[in-house]
Amino acid sequence: MHNKTIDVTKIFTFDSAHKLDHYEGDCKYLHGHTYKLEVTLRGKVDFRGMVMDFNDLKSIVKEKVLNKLDHRYLNDIFDFNTTCENMLVWIFQELDEAISDDRVKLQKLVLWETPTSFGTLERDQYYAES
């Protein structure tokens, strides 16, 4: 068995509606997205040769994120402006404690709003001094 650090990623989708406050473009009106969320973990493999079982990761993301956001109106859920950037910070907060331990860490999130527009939040960015 090797002792390498490996990144593993699982991709999820969810559908939500929202509108942006303090914005003068079309997104100030109610609209929806099929979001794509990429969740990347970094860690050492366990005795099975896995960083984390993808089914375990799926269960955590479903409980902490998807069940709360899928087919929902985001403005009714959050007290912040539901931009991709703000959503990434919230998702990181939801997942980091549930996933991270001394062997595995939540490393990176990528949230796609459209096929051509996305944001990325990495662990060092999240924990950097503001």
Image (cartoon, rainbow, N blue to C red):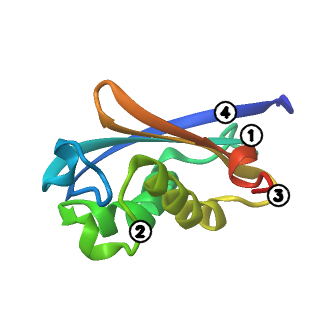
| Badge 4 vs badge 1, beta-carbon distance below 8 Å | no
Point out the tag, 2 or 4, that comes first from the N-terminus.
4
* Residue 4 as seen in the image, left or right of residue 16: right
Task: Identify the secondary structure beneath mark 3.
Answer: loop
Circle 1 is placed at which residue position?
45
Residue farthest right in this picture? 3
CA gap, disc 4 to disc 1?
Answer: 10 Å
* Residue 90 as seen in the image, left or right of residue 41: left
Q: Position of residue 42 (x, y in %)?
A: 70, 40
Q: Position of residue 106 (x, y in %)?
A: 65, 50
- Of circles 2 and 3, the one toward us is 2
Could you tell me which residue is drawn at 32 percent across and 69 percent down?
Answer: 68
Point out the tag, 1 or 2, that comes first from the N-terminus.
1
Point out the tag, 3 or 4, that comes first from the N-terminus.
4
CA gap, disc 2 to disc 4?
Answer: 31 Å
* Dot 1 amino acid type: Val
Which of the labelled discs sits on residue 102, or is there none?
A: 3
CA gap, disc 3 to disc 1?
Answer: 12 Å
User: Which quadrant is home to the N terminus?
Assistant: top right
* Dot 3 amino acid type: Asp
Circle 4 is placed at which residue position?
7
Are there few (<14), some (14-19), or many (20+) residues within 10 Å of tag 2?
A: few
Residue 80 occupies quadrant: bottom left
Circle 2 is placed at which residue position?
80
For residue 40, say whether it is visible. no
Task: Identify the secondary structure beneath mark 4.
Answer: strand
Point out the tag, 3 or 1, that comes first from the N-terminus.
1
- Of circles 4 and 1, the one toward us is 4
- Of circles 3 and 1, the one toward us is 3
